Image (cartoon, coloured by chain):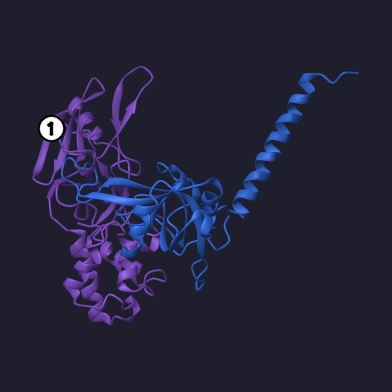
Amino acid sequence: MKPSIKCCIPVLICCFFGLAVVLCVVYYCFPLDFSRQKTNPLALSEGTEERLVALRGKLIQKLFPGPPEYSSVAKGDRADYCWILQLDSSSFFIAMTTPVGAPANDLSHIVKWPHPNEIFLALDEDMKNFCFEHINQEIVSEGHLFHAHTEHHYTPILMDVKRMLEKETHDFPLP
Amino acid sequence: MVFVKAEVGSPNYGDPKSKFTVRYFDDKGNMMIRSGGSRAWRCNNPGNLLASRYSMGVSRRSIGKAGDGVNEYAVYPDYETGHEALVVMLKGGVYSPLTLRASIKRYDGTNPKYIDEIVKITGFDPERTIKSLNNKEFEVFWKAIEQMEHWEVGREDFIEKWYISGVHKKRGVITEYLIKKSDGFSWISKENAIKLVIERKLHAVVVHLKTGNIYLRPESGSKPFELTS
C-alpha cells in the first residue's frame, strides 16, 4: 500500500515545527556571540618575542605618492620611493601566517590589498646600497614582520629588516 | 556635541578622492561635515592610524572609518580619543621596547628624515627606548610625532536634523509637514520633506509602496505624526 502524499504533509509539518523549536532552544541556550571571539590566529601571544623570519623574493623599487594627500606625485605629493620584496609563493605563505605583535585584521583583509604578495622593507640607511646593487634580483631578507597600521604603510605586510643577502649566500633556513 | 558615528563623505567638487570629507553624527542625527585641512584633522586621528583591528577595537572607541578607497582610516569622536589611540599604541608591547629610531622605522619607513626631525624637535638620543622615557619626555615624543603627522584645521559645516511635529492632510492624504527647527517652525511640501529625509536632514523614514507611491513614516520608536488643524 502506497502512503499518499496527503498523509505525509502533516508529518512533514510536524517535523518542520519540531526542528524549528529545537533550533530556537539551541539558539537561546547557546547564543553564538561572534563579537566575543577575541582569539586571532595572526596575533602573537602576549610576552612572546616577535619571530625572526627569512623571506625570499624579487627586490624591486616602487614609487608611491606620499604626504600630504597620498594621491598624485604630479599634483604635489611627496615621492616615496620604497623598496619592496615580491615574495615567492612559499615565502608569501609564511608572511601571511606569521603571528605579529599587533595584527591589523584577518587574512581576508590582507588579500584585499592590491598586490598582497609584496611586502614593504623598512630598512636602515646602510642597507640601501645593497638594494641598489640587487635591484630586480632574487634576494633573501631577514627581519620581523608587522602589519600595516599607519598611513605611511603601502603594503599590508611589512618587514623590519635586520639583514639582507643574495639568494645564493644565505646561511639561514629558508621556506 | 558628542559624536557617536562617522562615515566617509564624497570629496568637495574638484577635489581628488583622497581629499574625502568625513561626516560625524551625534545621537540625535545632527551631522557635522569636515572638509579641507589635513586627513589627521578630518578623522580626529592625530597619529594617522589606518582602520584596523587595533585602531578600531572597542577599547579604542573609534566611531567609524573613512578613506579614499585605497586606504581607510580610523575616525575618532574627538582629538583626545584619537590621541589616546596613538599613545596606547606607542606604550604597547610592540613599540615600547623599541628605540626611538627603530620605532620610527616602523611608524614611517618611507621617510628617512623622520627620525632626524624627531631628534631635532625633542633633543633625545635616538637610541633610547620608548619605555625609558619618563612621562614628560614621552609627552615631548608624542607631540613631535603629531607635529610630523600634520594637524591642519579645515572647514566644519553643521547640519541640524529636524523633526516633523505636525502634518496637514487633504482627503486623508498628507500634503504638508510642519518642521521643527532650532529657530522655529515652518511648513514644507511632501516632496521637499522626502528630499530632506533622503539627505538625512529630517527625522523620518521614506517608504516606497509597490504602487510607486512614496510616503514618510516616523522613525522606529518615535511617536506618530500629529494632524495639525
Chain colored purple: B
Query: With B127 as the anchor, is B1 left or right in this view?
Result: left
Residue B136: in sight, yes or no? yes
Q: Where's residue A4, x and y in %?
A: 81, 19
Q: Quadrant of the C terminus of chain B?
A: top left
Residue in the foreground of this view, choosing between B137 and B36? B137
Residue visible at 69% across and 39% down?
A19
**Farthest-out residue, left:** B183
Q: Label 1 crowding class (10 Å Cα cut-off): few <14, some 14-19, many 20+? A: some
Secondary structure under the numbered disc 1 in the rendered image: strand
How many discs mark residues in the rendered view? 1
Residue at the (69%, 34%) spot, across then down: A16
Viewer can see residue A42: no
Residue occupying the point 21% across, 75% down: B140
Q: Quadrant of residue A162?
A: bottom left
Colour in which the image shows chain A: blue
Q: Position of residue A18 (x, y in %)?
A: 70, 39
Q: Which residue is mark 1?
A: B187
Could you tell me the amino acid type at mark 1?
Answer: Trp
Q: Is residue A60 above or below residue B93?
A: above
